[in-house]
Amino acid sequence: MNRKSYDLLEDVISASGRWTALEVVNDSIYIDFSDVQLYNISYKKDSDLSPAGEISLRFAENSLFSIFYNNKKDIEFINKAKGRDNNFIIELNKKLDKGQFKFQNIDFLKNICLNFKKELIFLDNVNGENMEIPDFFLSFSCENIVICIGGDSLNFYNDFESLNDNDVLNLSNQWARYYLDYWIKKGSRKELKEDPICELYPLKINKKSMSFFKRIKKS
């Protein structure tokens, strides 16, 4: 992924996203997010599903995973881990803190961790005497904890399909078109089914701007 894709993913994942699963398989770490503002290609207008998609990240090789926290009750979700040793899976539902989700940003990690006194290390396979940070790493906050996760390889998946820079941009654009369509039709006979994610970010559209938005949607 290039830097523009990282910036885009930081926004579309944390804007309304939820952390839904963590799985560790030997040296690979899988972390899943839902309610991501990437268009769900399986969405159908007569379905109860939201157009907001899901995304899964896989960190591997020289991997690490740790949680920064203050109160033990905030990490009680780890008791739900199913498995043994370094192989386990946890299903959860934690709302992400908007804007507090960063790839490749060590300064963000250092600053945000100043607010936390304790660290729980799940996996630490970092090699070398200097304990260098892996090639790829992600840090984010949610519900009074900070997660740090990394590895020397990083892959992105959507519905088990690998995502590249073009995929991320296209899915983001499709979501943006849906979002505009949702608000253009709001209050009309063609009003779409209420979408809680769209409702988080109301868009006021006047008659003068209506034709402009319609042209964007069709482009």
Image (spheres, grey):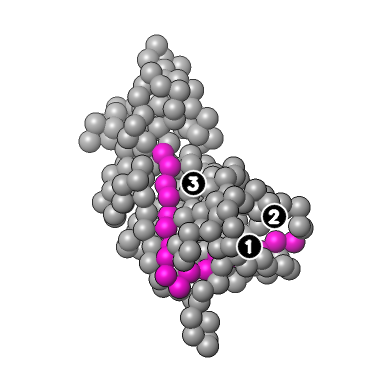
Q: Quadrant of residue 7?
A: bottom left
Nearer the observer, 186 or 137: 137
Q: Quadrant of the N terminus?
A: bottom left
Image spot of residue 128 (x, y percent): 49, 85
Magenta region includes residue 68: yes
**Residue 103 visible in the current orientation:** no
Badge 2 density bin: few <14, some 14–19, many ≥20, Cα 10 Å: some
Residues at discs 2 and 1 in contact (Cβ within 8 Å): yes
Q: CA distance from mark 3 to mark 2?
A: 18 Å
Q: Please give the range of residues in magenta.
A: 53-70
Q: Secondary structure at mark 2?
A: helix
Q: Secondary structure at mark 3?
A: strand
- Please state if 185 lies on the left or on the right of 124 as rendered: left
Label placed on residue 33: 3
Q: CA distance from mark 2 to mark 1?
A: 8 Å
Disc 2 marks which amino acid?
Ile
Q: Return the residue at label 1.
A: 67
Instruction: Residue at the far bottom: name it.
Output: 129
Main SS of the magenta part reads: strand
Q: Is residue 191 depicted above or below 113 in this figure?
A: above
